[in-house]
Amino acid sequence: MFCNVCKNEWNGSPDDTRCPHCGADLKKNAEKHTIPGVIAFLIEKEGADVLLKPERVMSFISDLVQGNEREKKLVRVGSVNGAFQKAHALLEEPKQSKREVMVLEMRHYLMDSAFLSEENAVLLVNILLDGIGMPSLRLNSAQKKAPDQPQKKTPPKVTGTEQKKNAPPTKSAPVQPKKPAPKKQAPVNSAPNTAGVTGKDKQKSQNTRQSGGFRLNSLSTFEYDGVSFASQKVDGSLFLKGEARMIGILVTYDPVPVSMNVSLDWQIFRQDGSPLTGLIHGMGVVNRGDTDFYQGWGWAVPGNWETGRYTVKASMNGSGQLTTYFDIVDGCYDNPRLTMNSLKLFSAGGMPPAISERKYFTAFSSHQARRIYFEISFARINAPVYTTMRYKITRDNGEIVANYAIPIRLRNGDTACWTGFGWENPGHWKKGRYGYEVTLGKSNNIFRGIFDIV
């Protein structure tokens, strides 16, 4: 226990109400404390290395902070998943540019390894940043919450047939956003007032209606090549400068009751708040029961995006605005010259077990399988490597179950890395045979194989 009045510490009970040294009301004092405040106090009192003792930090937070149960649970999850150690590394890093990248990596690490939602990962990162005295690095809220900071970028070059067809091409214009409709619809570009209605959809549109009554649910981003959406779409919000081409946005909403014409208005902003694009206006037809709509903007070739944070704001049929962000960071998916040895699969929920405790299979019970992890082993590396691990999972009928690229920082001495897809609780995997493709960096070594859910 700790008294904030006389600064004495003792072994006591959470039920203690008075300090045995000065008699101060512990509950009254505790109510004044915040989690960042406790972390800052401990760093001032014991030095930054206290972050390497997460159990000690958590004991102080438990004693001193009343309420804030959600935040305390998040910090507790972070304490057993290396979040305090990452905060300590931030304090040790002198360069601001590297700190910014490390903050983004911390968010993605917590989402991937601690299985936090993006919103909770951002909240936890911000609590730690406030505690270590780096509020300037705070991340903005995820998805529909607070608007995020935009980013900085110069206009791209014109490519693509859609733009030539529907808008006067200029050398400074970007690749026009395409809308490969979720169902039967043909792609459309974003030239103002250009509808993407062709074939059957053109006939059907006569029986559809425009409606502003959309209930929007989420806005997310992905990257693809601007041509093949179904096979090339890679979900995420962190993209590497050396590979990013078209950045797409996906708007989800409640199932529509009838087929209707829709309009999607969206814009990308730089980090300084200035607009990167004009208002992008796309139109199309959604069918009854549809729940998503997407478009993209960018280049057909990589290397044109500037590094930094970009904000996307979008509305559909005049409904309430959604905001999200994505980050472009230095690096590319180059082969980091890793000598890859093998790929093995295991299943886990929550935190993956230590490597020595893992059990590897190629068949998993539908009643027990949770997340299916891909673990790549390689020769020991002698310097840190910033790369990405890509994986695609398909069912035997060709349906794409998952297609992700996970940025990974490998540390000096590492011999393996892993990532996975699935659920924290069992019962969600459908029985059947699944195929997978897994790569690390731009290695020619592509691991392909199958696993069964039985």
Image (tube, rainbow, N blue to C red):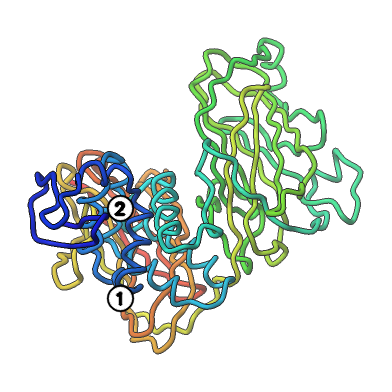
Q: Quadrant of residue 282?
A: top right
**Residue 363, percent from left and from top:** 19, 55
Horizontal arrangement in the rendering, residue 374 relative to residue 152 (left or right): left
> In what quadrant of the picture does the N terminus appear?
bottom left
The kind of secondary structure element at disc 2 is: helix
How many angstroms separate mark 1 from mark 2 (CA)?
Answer: 35 Å
Q: Amino acid at mark 1?
A: Ser
Looking at the image, can residue 116 be seen? Answer: yes
Query: Residue 75 — which label?
Result: 2
Q: Are marks 1 and 2 in contact (CB under 8 Å)?
A: no
Q: Nearer the viewer, mark 1 or mark 2?
A: 2
Instruction: Give the labeled residue for mark 1.
Output: 342
Q: Residue at x 71, y 17 (%)?
A: 203
Identify the residue at horizontal 24%, vertical 69% (top origin): 53
Q: Position of residue 436 (x, y in %)?
A: 37, 58
Mark seen at residue 69: none
Q: Is residue 351 visible?
A: no
List the single residue furthest toward the bottom. Answer: 382
Question: How many C-alpha atoms fall within 10 Å of the one at disc 1: few (<14), some, or many (≥20)?
Answer: few
Helix, strand, or loop for circle 1?
Answer: strand
Q: Nearer the viewer, residue 325 or 181?
A: 325
Foreground of the two, 405 or 137: 137
Residue at 23 percent of width and 60 percent of height: 352
What x and y, as percent, mark residue 177?
Answer: 72, 43
Residue pictured at 25% horizontal, 64% vertical: 54
